[in-house]
Image (tube, grey):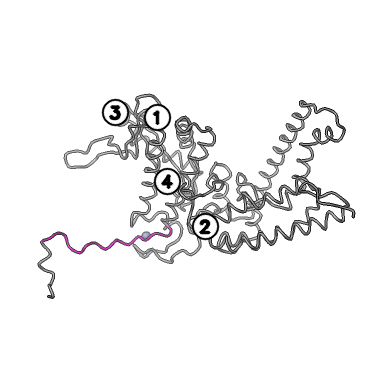
């Protein structure tokens, strides 16, 4: 015998190691193939199982076994040819597959590329543990300062790898159309991937239906959502993504705004605020019932004790053709200034502060909205006695899920009117024949 499995890894001759690794890779190929039909039926659950569990198996082996990166080719092939198309519910192109197999902060899906990461996973792991392993081998005592130094040096190398990924992603995006490139770059420039890293369990409101999850993925990558109707059921217009996100008929566009309002009122109540108000009046209507002004929600004590804070939300379709000449920041600034000029003076007259909360339909938040989320994190983490960063992560992901769900409804929901009772009041009843 020239090799043996040892502590989850393998030691022995290169030939035996390669043979063992090939068998392991075949095992993972089978696992990914088994998960693919689940991705077809329940994409979010399969995605979480893949990224939070399955891929950690080969990441671990890559850290402890100095194997040949090419051995992982069949695995990457299966991920791109089998798993990802099932996840998206439609075929994917080669360069899309390359993008998806990247960390989410670099525009990917957090799917670990088993070939590209193989060498760096092993080298970084060996570097981080070299002081520890030499102390174990020699029996000498461990110098904690040296050990800390090795860990720090690995962290610096990780930053270099991150820089490489960033440049590599920018180069890859050149192979996408200008429209898609601009849309994907926004996901790289802003923090908007929290919803991908949540674990949906019953009752935590993070579970998305197959359509909701796939629509959110499509919007993230500037793809056309699958199974789109041909025409709008309210006005007969061609039903493309922009029509779905902009058509006000049937109240679906207004609904995504209301959902965010209701969620925020709920979060503020959970944070222990007693004086939370949905749609507070800022300016009373005149004698004809016109010219009134309402914010979306208000709360006392959010920024300063006893002072009322008013908020108004706007969820905009930043990829609309009429807005594509504007950078996202300019677009946010434009909308923000408009809201401030409408509300601020009246809010000040009521001794209240006013803040617009802006986000795009694919859940990218404006920087001021991020400040709001962080402030909410301070209040909620205190109330729940939870870590601040975790609480902020929860609030951001929860707000993203809320927007993505209501945006999916704009694509899938019905815009036709509900049938009413058919009569205005009881006076119409004599006109209805009685067949007795
Ligand atoms: Zn329409």
The earlier-in-sequence mark between 4 and 2 is 2
Taking depth in this image into account, of 204 and 371 the one nearest to the observer is 204
Instruction: Quickly name the residue at label 2.
Output: 214
User: Which secondary structure is most common in the magenta stretch?
Assistant: loop
According to the image, label 1 marks what residue?
A: 302
| Mark pair 3, 1: CA separation | 16 Å
First-in-chain label (3 vs 1): 1
For disc 2, the neighbor class at 10 Å (few under 14, some 14 to 19, many from 20) is: many
Judging depth in this view, the residue of 201 and 206 nearest the camera is 201
Of circles 1 and 4, the one toward us is 1
First to last magenta residue range: 411-426
Residue identified by numbered label 4: 315
As drawn, is 244 to the left or to the right of 51?
left
- SS for dot 3: loop
Secondary element type, mark 2: helix
The answer to whether residue 168 is above or below residue 30 is: above
Q: Please tell me which of labels 2 and 1 falls first in the chain.
A: 2
State the residue at coordinates (26%, 35%): 283
Q: Quadrant of the C terminus?
A: bottom left
In this rendering, position of residue 362 left or right of residue 436: right
Q: Which residue is mark 3?
A: 350
């Amino acid at each position: 015998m020239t090799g043996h499995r040892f502590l989850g890894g393998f030691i022995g001759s290169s030939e035996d190691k390669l043979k063992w690794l090939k068998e392991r890779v075949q095992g993972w190929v089978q696992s990914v193939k088994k998960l693919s039909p689940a991705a077809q039926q329940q994409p979010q659950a399969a995605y979480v199982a893949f990224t939070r569990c399955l891929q950690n198996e080969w990441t671990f082996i890559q850290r402890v076994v100095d194997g040949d990166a090419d051995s992982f080719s069949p695995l990457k092939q299966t991920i791109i040819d089998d798993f990802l198309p099932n996840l998206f519910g439609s075929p994917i192109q080669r360069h899309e597959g390359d993008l998806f197999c990247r960390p989410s902060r670099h525009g990917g899906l957090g799917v670990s590329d088993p070939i590209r990461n193989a060498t760096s996973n092993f080298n970084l792991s060996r570097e981080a543990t070299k002081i520890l392993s030499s102390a174990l081998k020699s029996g000498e005592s461990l110098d904690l300062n040296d050990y800390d130094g090795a860990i720090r040096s690995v962290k610096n190398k990780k930053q270099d790898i991150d820089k490489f990924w960033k440049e590599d992603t920018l180069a890859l995006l050149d192979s996408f159309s200008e429209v898609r490139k601009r849309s994907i770059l926004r996901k790289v420039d802003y923090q908007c991937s929290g919803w991908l890293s949540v674990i949906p369990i019953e009752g935590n409101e993070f579970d998305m239906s197959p359509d909701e999850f796939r629509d959110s993925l499509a919007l993230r990558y500037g793809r056309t959502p699958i199974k789109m109707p041909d025409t709008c059921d309210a006005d007969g217009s061609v039903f493309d993504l922009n029509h779905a996100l902009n058509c006000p008929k049937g109240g679906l566009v207004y609904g995504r705004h209301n959902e965010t309002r209701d969620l925020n009122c709920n979060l503020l109540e959970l944070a222990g605020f007693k004086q939370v108000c949905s749609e507070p009046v800022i300016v009373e209507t005149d004698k004809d019932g016109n010219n009134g002004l309402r914010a979306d929600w208000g709360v006392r004590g959010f920024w300063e004790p006893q002072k009322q804070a008013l908020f108004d939300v706007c969820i905009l379709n930043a990829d609309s053709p009429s807005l594509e000449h504007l950078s996202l920041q300019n677009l946010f600034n434009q909308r923000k200034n408009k809201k401030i000029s409408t509300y601020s003076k009246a809010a000040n007259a009521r001794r209240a502060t006013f803040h617009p909360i802006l986000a795009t339909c694919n859940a990218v938040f404006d920087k001021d909205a991020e400040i709001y989320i962080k402030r909410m994190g301070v209040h909620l983490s205190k109330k729940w006695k939870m870590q601040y960063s975790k609480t902020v992560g929860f609030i951001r992901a929860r707000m993203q899920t809320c927007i993505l769900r209501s945006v999916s409804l704009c694509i899938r929901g019905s815009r036709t009117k509900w049938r009413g009772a058919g009569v205005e009041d009881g006076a119409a009843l004599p006109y209805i024949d009685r067949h007795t």
